[in-house]
Amino acid sequence: MVDKLDRQNDLFISYGHVDNEPVAGQPRWVTYFHEQLRARLAQLLGVSWEELQIYRDERLQENDLLTDEICSQLNRSAALAAVLTPRYLNSRWCQEELRLFCERFSRIENRAVTKVPLFLIKKTPIDGSSLPDCLPEIMGYEFYDSKSIPPKEFPIDPRDDGYLKFREAFERVAFHLCRYLKQLRSPTTTEPVGVVYVAETTAELNNVRLKLVDELEERGYLVLPNQNLSTDGAHLRPQVETCLHRARLSIHLLGRQHALVPEGDVHCKARLQLDLAAGATGRSDLHRIIWVPEGTAPSDPRQAALLEYARQEFSNQRNTDVLEAGLSELKQLIHRRMNTHRTKEPAGHTRPSVYVLSDIQDSDLVQPVHDYIHDRGCEVRPTVFDGSEAERLTYHQAMLQQAEGALIYWGLGSEAWMRTKLGELSKALGLGRPMPFLANAVLVGTPSSRAKDAFKAHGMSILRPTPATRDALLSALEGFLRPLAPTS
């Protein structure tokens, strides 16, 4: 057995060389992916390019046998990214690289992670039945549109309209690889906050599912299934049951399309996962969320029947929410249910926190608001005005990422100040915030003005106390605090 991971390369990129040939004026795909990944990982890890080692064999020809140099580089690599294409699956060279890496990883005793650090970059559609036996059941990253006929690869030219789809898939790779490399640099043995089952869904909602998985994992949750479910009904059922047995929350996404029916079964994958979760709801510690995007119009009579089945069968079932709303409402509901059913309370978060943004002129006027929020069982995170500009910015960004609720107190501050704070709240998810705020509002204080009377904002509660008294102001906070469900 190997006692530890001998790491000199952060990543080994395995690919078929023909897949790096330029086509139709596009840049070399693997070269572009390599260069972009190196730059992005350096940014995410906060290191220089020299500190980040990514190995790729750049010779023009493939050999039937691996060279000593390739074997040596494989043995020194912490992770492997395999660019899956038809050529890759037909290459003895590529398959041998896969086999050697997986075999080496299985011999390591003191590992910081248990899953094989293998990143499957699905550049081109492939026949799943032709995957090598050594390849574990790992969910990969699709860099093509599986819904188009024929499937179309995402372009790598930033001027192309489809480039954003390439970038979305690329950012997921960079995000997961960064998290793995951070874990290697600072290995921890902390247990997950909890276990969440996010059911496999159809292609139209798969990007939503992937984003939910990323956000949950970033918050410290273990998300299942973490490998592809079987297409055979007899094997799929025990897979799902095993995952559900560990979970405390299951999430099911139902859209316009009808899911595939596993071999040997009469119901689609979505219905099977729903029913298996239903069979587990006798447990008081398992909650289920069924989400249908607002305005969904089924494209198939079978899907229309499934949606009606979900509404009729589960709307009044214990420990079940059937939600037909937007994505932000789904995320807020998930957050609330996790707070109720989580098995481990994160340090420092025993009480929900509210970030109160106020102008320095309102320091005295906002104090009763702080006191009221505190008395209701929430932790108050006030605006700070002392310290250096860099220290204030660091605190501000941390509060945007961590607080469960956000409240803008608009008193003596200008409209420009208020709208600046509103814009900063709207960008919180881009700063790394994993979930939307459970509660966010603008509390309009004195003095009154035409701008305050006319002010409106999408996705934000506007609290206008009437009359403009202290008691009315505090009373207006009652509804704002309700979603936070604070404990006193």
Image (cartoon, helix red, strand yellow):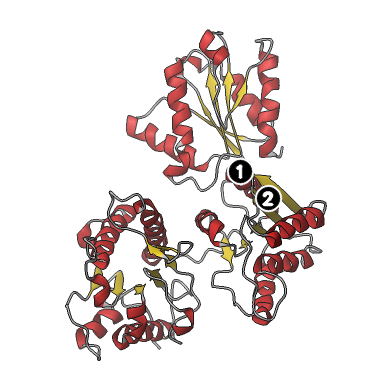
446 vs 256, nearest the viewer: 256
Disc 1 on helix, strand or loop? loop
Residue type, mark 1 in image: Gly
- List the residue tagged with mark 1: 326
* Spot occupied by residue 85 in the image (x, y as percentages of width and height): 36, 75
| Residue 209 in view, yes or no | no
Residue 475, placed above or below residue 132? above
Quadrant position of the N terminus in the picture: bottom left
**x and y percentages locating residue 375 in the rendered image:** 68, 29
Is 92 positioned to the left or the right of 457 in the image? Answer: left
Name the residue at 70% across, 34% down: 482
Q: Helix or strand or loop: what does disc 2 sit on?
A: helix
Determine whether 106 is above or below 459 in the image: below
Q: Who's the residue at 69% across and 67% down the image?
A: 273
Judge from the rendering whether residue 345 lies leftward or rightward of residue 220; answer left or right: right
Q: Quadrant of residue 15?
A: bottom left
Numbered badge on residue 337: 2
Confirm whether residue 327 shows in the render. Answer: yes
Q: Bin the neighbour count of mark 1 within 10 Å (Cα to Cα): few under 14, some 14-19, many 20 and up.
A: few
Which residue is at the front of the view, 51 or 14? 14
Of tags 1 and 2, the one toward the viewer is 1
Residue 9 lies, with reference to residue 372, above or below; the image says: below
Q: Amino acid at mark 2?
A: Arg
